[in-house]
Amino acid sequence: MGMFHSININASGLTAERLRMDIISKNIANANTTRTSSGTPYRRQVPVFKQVDASFSQVLSQVKNGEPVGNGVEVIGIKEDKSPFKKVYNPGHPDADKEGYVQMPNVDIVTEMVNMISATRSYEANVTAMNSTKSMAMKALEIGR
């Protein structure tokens, strides 16, 4: 595995985790949005990642050479969480039904904050790995002097 391959893997991880943090921020910002353009409360969104596929010959040569197998990660979509909306009693709210209940988004702030911490840690891990690769390359260049 070459140095640039390692950097590309880290770059794909950075991109994916940044998107994950953006989506979590959007979920938190809309935690109290009771009406969207479709007329329903906001639905929590979740990114879907998958490993970047490699050809059979690439995987075979990586395994044969004892190299780690992997090409990074890519985002294949953003899905809506289909869990039910929360119902809150608030008869004075403009979106309340005839019993006085308002459908609230299916966003749980605590869950979103835990996910944000996880995404931040993953982002930091990718930055650290990229900086280590860069540092090794600089040391290799110094040896060549």
Image: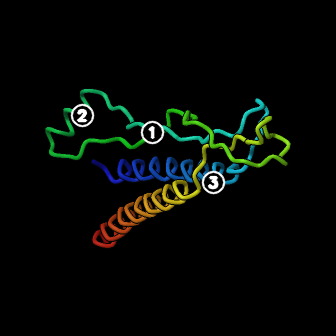
Element assignment for label 2: helix
For the residue carrying disc 2, how many other residues have a C-alpha within 10 Å: few (<14), some (14-19), or many (20+)?
some
**Which secondary structure lies at badge 1?**
strand
Q: Is residue 25 above or below residue 142?
A: above
Q: Which residue is mark 3?
A: 25
- The residue lying toward the viewer, choosing from 77 and 93, is 93
Question: Can you name the residue that lies furthest to the top here?
Answer: 56
Nearer to us: label 1 or label 3: 3
Frontmost residue, 37 versus 23: 37
Residue position for label 1:
49
Camera-nearest label, 1 or 2: 1
Question: Compared with residue 121, is residue 13 higher up or lower down, i.e. above or below?
Answer: above
Circle 3: element type: helix
Q: Between residue 75 and residue 33, name the one nearer to us.
A: 33
The residue identified by callout 2 is: 59
Residues at marks 1 and 3, CA–CA distance in whole angstroms: 18 Å
